[in-house]
Amino acid sequence: MILDDIVADKKKRLPEHKKRVGEEEMKQLALASDRIGISFYEALKKPGLSIIGEFKKASPSMGEIGETIPLEKRIEEYNQSVDAISCLTEEDHFHGNADYFREIRGISPLPMIRKDFIIDEYQIYEAKVIGADCILLIAAILDDSELKSFYQLARSLSLDVLVETHDEKEMERALRLSPRIVGVNNRNLKDFSISLMQTKWLRPMVPDGTVFVSESGVAKDEDIAFLKECKVDALLIGRAFMESDNPMALATRWKSI
């Protein structure tokens, strides 16, 4: 399965990172950080539809993504039209890294989520160090103990957490954390098939006051209309924006639907 391959490669990568910056050093850098974060939660909880604009260089489903506009121009348009930014930092399958994150952090005032396959505390400390405001925790790759401890560690570092689910069982597990933000990935990470119905099916499980994010699969106006009917608080959009040479116009139109 694709997800298994991604996690296996992440496990191989982590020792390389820890050789460059040791575990204790990364922890101390995170604890010593005096950066005042930008609330990812507050950016998404306001009335109306919020949009998280994503930046990624590639993906298993899309392959290499040819940039339609320079990174600086893209982020400038995001700054004027979306509510938060997602940046992939996974190297092998999404061709991301922490340097891309830092570059975007330096040119955007928006809250940013480090989107990666987090399987180790080290990655959470690193997220704090590179300027993340939020991290992604994927229920499909973590057991209950890991989910809880990683969630608590992130919150202790003043990081928001988007807990990602795909089905009822994962949603039940996620909700045991009483998360402030929970997401449904419409893409099945095992075979990368997409169904927006995942959002519709899981929406009733999410309690009032919890920010509900629908991730992946948005490609056209009809998708936006459908997901708005599902009463989502926010959308995380990657492919449509990355393939657009005018993401600001696209985001503005979709917010008005």
Image: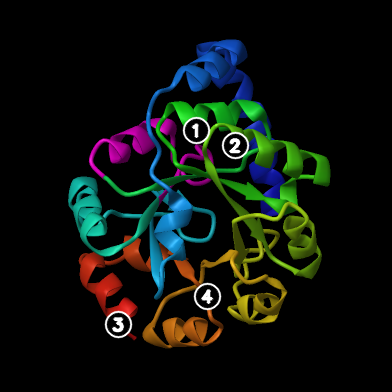
3D distance between C-alphas at marks 2 and 3: 34 Å
Who comes first in sequence, dot 2 or dot 1? Answer: 1
Residue type marked 4? Val
Q: Residue furthest front?
A: 209
Disc 2 crowd rating (10 Å Cα; few below 14, some 14-19, many 20+) is: many
**Which part of the image, by quadrant, shows the C terminus?**
bottom left
Disc 1 crowd rating (10 Å Cα; few below 14, some 14-19, many 20+) is: many
The foreground one among 81 and 140 is 81
Q: Position of residue 100 (x, y in %)?
A: 35, 37
The reply to whether residue 119 is visible in this rendering is yes
Kindly report which numbered mark, 4 or 1, lies closer to the viewer in this rendering.
Answer: 4
The foreground one among 103 and 13 is 103
Residue type marked 3? Ser
Q: Is residue 132 magenta?
A: no
Q: Position of residue 178 (x, y in %)?
A: 70, 55
Could you tell me which secondary element the residue under label 2 belongs to?
helix
> In the rendered image, which residue does mark 3 sit on?
256
Q: Is residue 92 magenta?
A: yes
Kindly report which numbered mark, 2 or 1, lies closer to the viewer in this rendering.
Answer: 2
Residues at discs 2 and 3 in contact (Cβ within 8 Å):
no
Residue 229 horizontal side relative to residue 140, left or right: left
* Residue at 27%, 45% in the rendered image: 109
> In the rendered image, which residue does mark 2 sit on?
154
> In the rendered image, which residue does mark 4 sit on?
232
Residues at discs 2 and 1 in contact (Cβ within 8 Å):
yes
Give, as a single range, the part of the protein colored magenta. Answer: 86-108
Residues at discs 4 and 1 in contact (Cβ within 8 Å):
no
